[in-house]
C-alpha cells in the first residue's frame, strides 16, 4: 500500500524497456530476422547501461 506512489528508479525503468525490447525481438524473429537482430542489439546495449548503473550504486 505504501509503495503505491513510489517512483521507479532509473534501473527499474531500463529493465522494463529491456524486457519489452526482448519480447519485440522475439515476436519479430518469426517474420523479419534483421529487425529482430536490431532489437536484440538495442536490448544488449540497454543491458550494458543497466550493469553500469548497478555498479555505480
Image: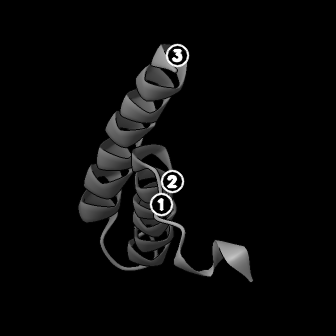
Q: Which residue is mark 1?
A: 8
Q: Label 2 to label 1, Cα distance in Å?
A: 6 Å
Label 1 sits on a secondary structure element that is loop
Dividing the picture into quadrants, the one containing residue 3 is bottom right
Q: Where residue 47 appears, x then y in whole percent?
A: 45, 37
Other-residue count near label 3 (Cα within 10 Å), few / some / many at <14 / 14–19 / ≥20: few
50, above or below 8, in the image: above
Real-space Cα distance between discs 2 and 3? 14 Å
Between 54 and 17, the one nearer to me in the picture: 54
- Residue at x 42% of width, y 58% of height: 13
The answer to whether residue 34 is left or right of residue 31 is: left
Residue beneath label 3, please? 55
Using the image as rendered, state which of residue 15 and residue 27 is in the foreground: 15
Are circles 1 and 3 on residues that touch, CB within 8 Å?
no
Q: Secondary structure at mark 2?
A: helix
Residue at 46% over, 64% down: 7
Q: Quadrant of residue 17?
A: bottom left
Amino acid at each position: 500500500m505504501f509503495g503505491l506512489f513510489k517512483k521507479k528508479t532509473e534501473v527499474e525503468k531500463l529493465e522494463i524497456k529491456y524486457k519489452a525490447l526482448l519480447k519485440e525481438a522475439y515476436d519479430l524473429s518469426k517474420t523479419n530476422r534483421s529487425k529482430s537482430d536490431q532489437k536484440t542489439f538495442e536490448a544488449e546495449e540497454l543491458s550494458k547501461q543497466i550493469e553500469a548503473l548497478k555498479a555505480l550504486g
